[in-house]
Image: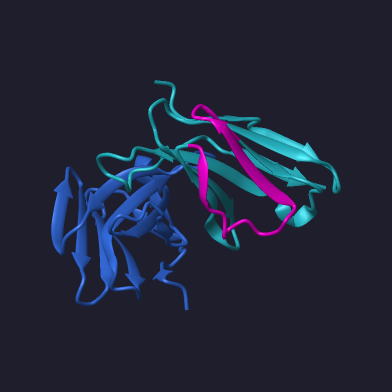
Amino acid sequence: DAGVIQSPRHEVTEMGQEVTLRCKPISGHDYLFWYRQTMMRGLELLIYFNNNVPIDDSGMPEDRFSAKMPNASFSTLKIQPSEPRDSAVYFCASSLTSGRSDEQFFGPGTRLTVL
Amino acid sequence: QKEVEQDPGPLSVPEGAIVSLNCTYSNSAFQYFMWYRQYSRKGPELLMYTYSSGNKEDGRFTAQVDKSSKYISLFIRDSQPSDSATYLCAMAMVSNYQLIWGAGTKLIIKP
């Protein structure tokens, strides 16, 4: 398996633009997580899905952020409009229902810079 | 106060030294304890996992949990430059798939 795939790897955009981050989880994994990582705040959970259904989005910072999972193999995180304070590395992770629920497999991340 | 406290470092030690990384937590409901390793510009990867008090060993790595003190540790023996990374502790409650993360400690092993 190729692991969790994220695209793009790097994104530079200007304030006010829409940004869409994409994730393909590991095949067969039931859970998908979106995280944001900054030096100041560390790793923060934004939202997670179980079987394509959003379970907890309490970490989504503002209404400017939205996430979807239209099927088991694809998820998007959208920021509209983007702001400089959204600059961070965004990780997608997936895990199995059975077995060790704690083991989350992370993608390589998308480094977002908002100018 | 954060649920999980971890010193961000950096911690710099010479090659071959024993390294001790630590986290404290406040929620006694945490039952699962993990250490993730994150290399620069990569995603975190699971290194060690335990759910009981005591020690768990895997090669040069030992994870220690003291639930009575709400304190967990990761020991690295015979540290190598390739161990240079950020180490994040994470915790979870029973049947809860949400992990609570420490801030991560940046470890530097000097050759």
User: What residue is shown at x 25% (from left), y 50% (from top)?
Assistant: B49
Q: Is residue B111 visible?
A: no
In the image, residue A13 lies at what x, y percent? 81, 40
Q: Is residue B107 magenta?
A: no
In the image, residue A70 lies at what x, y percent? 59, 32
In the image, residue B85 lies at what x, y percent? 42, 47
User: What residue is shown at x 65% (from left), y 49% (from top)?
Assistant: A88
Quadrant housing the N terminus of chain A: top left
> Could you say which chain is coloured cyan in the image?
A
What residue span does the magenta drawing correspond to? A52-75
Q: Is residue B16 left or right of residue B102?
A: left
Q: Is residue B31 left or right of residue A113?
A: left
Q: Is residue A54 magenta?
A: yes
In the image, residue A89 lies at what x, y percent? 61, 46
User: What residue is shown at x 43% (from left), y 44% (from top)?
Assistant: B44
Q: Is residue B52 left or right of residue A61?
A: left
**Residue found at the very far top of the displayed protein:** A1
Question: In this structure image, what is the colour of chain B?
Answer: blue
User: What residue is shown at x 60% (from left), y 63% (from top)?
Assistant: A40
Is the residue B54 above or below the residue B58 in the image? below
